[in-house]
Amino acid sequence: MPKMTMAQALVKFLDNQYVSFDGEETKFVEGIFTVFGHGIVVGLGQALDEDPGSLKVFQGKNEQGMAHAATAFAKMNNRRRIIACASSIGPGSANMVTAAATATVNNVPLLLFPADTFSTRQPDPVLQQFEQADSLSITTTDAFRPVARYWDRITRPEQLMSAMINAMRALTDTANAGAVVIALPQDVEGETYDYPESFLQKRVHRITRISPVDNELADIADVIRNAEKPLVIAGGGVRYSEAGETLERFCETFNIPFSETQSGKSAVHSSHPLNLGGVGVTGNAPANAIAKEADVVIGVGTRFSDFTTASKSLFRADAKFVTINTDRFDAYKLDAVKCVADAKTALLGLETALGDYKTAYTTEIADVKQAWNEEVRRLADYHYGEGFEPLIKARYEATIPEFIETFGSALTQTEALLKIRSLIAPDAVAVAASGSLPGDMQRLWTTDAKDSYNMEYGYSCMGYEISGAFGSKLAKPDQEVYAFVGDGAFLMLHSELITSLQEGAKINVVLFDNAGFGCINNLQMSNGIGNLATEFRKRDENGALLGSLLHIDYAKVGEGYGCKAYTVRTLEELAFAIEDAKKQTVSTLIDVKVLPKTMTDGYGAWWHVGLASTSNKPSVQEAYKNKAENLSKARKY
């Protein structure tokens, strides 16, 4: 029973954790991200300095950013490898709360060690301590409770053992992986205990496939067998089950078209003849058209978010739902007939149960896909003045010339994105999270290389993009990684771009600058609201944020950090930048000036947002009327 501090035992424990999936054993913890502060540097920091074992220590630049990077690393490793994150107390801990929520919503394992106040309370209030007068037991780390799958605080060194066993349980749970938070009081980090060798020895956690129950398989088979035009929706569960090929073969056998959620994209091949593409609010015309006619919707590994279901308005009122999901909570959604099981094993069993079943589809799938191909060709050559004006309000018709004069660019977002897709490698990893880019990418980005799409859209967290690209590169060092980020999200958080330079982990940041929060500007103005604080403008003579556009040279920001940077205003400049960026060994930043309002939009889906039911503005009244009409057609639960 070696005598060691709690922090020293924690490091040794982490270094000896392994997982096994389908017989393949993998070391689970790659290392620890940290921004050292007084609450952790002399405790956990001392342990890592003295004997880190094989754990690698990464220096984060922002606690939220490093935790996003760790989340992306785990996702790109199919949840079988993680990087833990440690922070000091107070603001350092609180900075990771957003990242914890992001990981939990997306069911990605994230292990966090926020430092905490003194267990003895002797020096209270210690530097950066948040004191709650109602209870001295409450600290900043309690803020993690609502966003964590498992939360614990180590107030005695021997508590480490049960806490970490439960942490591993939660982190390797296929149904409910997410953030695990172990708060470390700074005095307890340095306290000594005789830890048993059994706790510190190698431990292998088996990530097992949940087998379907025969009766549940029979239930969903009965529903599908009576369907004429079913539709499969492939979610993130297909990706994590590595069930893409199984799902494609299943759909081929029975002639069932399938669509993708943001999380499920790149689990299956974009070029597959039965793949209709993204579905829902950010979905394609083909998937949404078929979804509206489907009599049975088969959800595989999806949690049916409001974007996937178009706020439950996308499907027929009499459509039936069946679900395959490892999470019983998600399996019950939309009053579905459920099968709680791993996607791959359930699909294999269902294939047998359906026998010689065939759908009634004839040419409908090919027809909608052909029409979509024509639309993609239009968007690839989509210029200002050609089919552009009908998509914008009078306000935008005044803004566009101003933008062109200010930035010297008339490049549209869709033509730029499609040009990039044509130039980069098929297996290049694309990372994004917020704004209008997720919609454009779910519709237009092709993913025939497995797991080449890392879209964080469960939380749509601005600031994930660049951190996520860095984490993806750590996971996939031999592949090019591209962060697709708007100017608003870039300004929100890009700290780990510097860490990518420090680590020699080259990422490519493609920054779409449309001078503001373009996606939300669309939302407010399309619902009758004025142009309020969503464009990057100076104040005008009346004190409103409606003055001239801000001109920011993001390429110079990248150059200042040490990146190779480019400014792009034409397709020719874009092609040069993409090709030259491939030759670089350092991270790159490509500042692409794109016209506002040139993203994709519509394609037959509606999104429920909380509009004002009372307003003096006719435009808001009209928007509320439209909402009420759509809501009356939507499913109620």
Image (cartoon, rainbow, N blue to C red):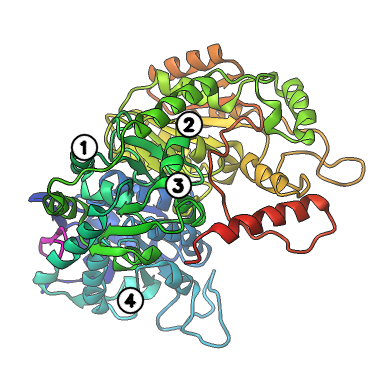
Circle 2 sits on which residue? 509
Near mark 1 (Cα within 10 A), the count class, few <14, some 14-19 or many ≥20, is: some
Which residues are the magenta region? Answer: 201-213
Q: Nearer the viewer, residue 624 or 491?
A: 624
Residue identifier under label 4: 154
Specify the farthest residue to the bottom.
Answer: 134
Q: Residue at x 30, y 61 (%)?
A: 177
Pointer 1: what residue?
252
Q: What residue does disc 3 label?
A: 292
- Judged from the image, the secondary structure of the residue bearing numbered disc 2 is strand
Q: Position of residue 309 (x, y in %)?
A: 46, 53
Locate residue 89 relative to residue 194 in the image: left or right. Answer: right
Q: Quadrant of residue 550?
A: top right
Is 244 included in the stretch rendered in magenta? no
Kindly indicate whether the residue at mark 1 contacts the one at mark 2 (C-beta within 8 angstroms).
no
Percent position (x, y) of residue 583? 38, 16
User: Disc 3 to disc 1, how far (Cα)?
Assistant: 21 Å
Q: Nearer the viewer, mark 2 or mark 1?
A: 1
From this view, report whether residue 601 is shown above or below residue 323: above
Mark 2: which amino acid? Val
For the residue marked with disc 4, what is the amino acid?
Ile
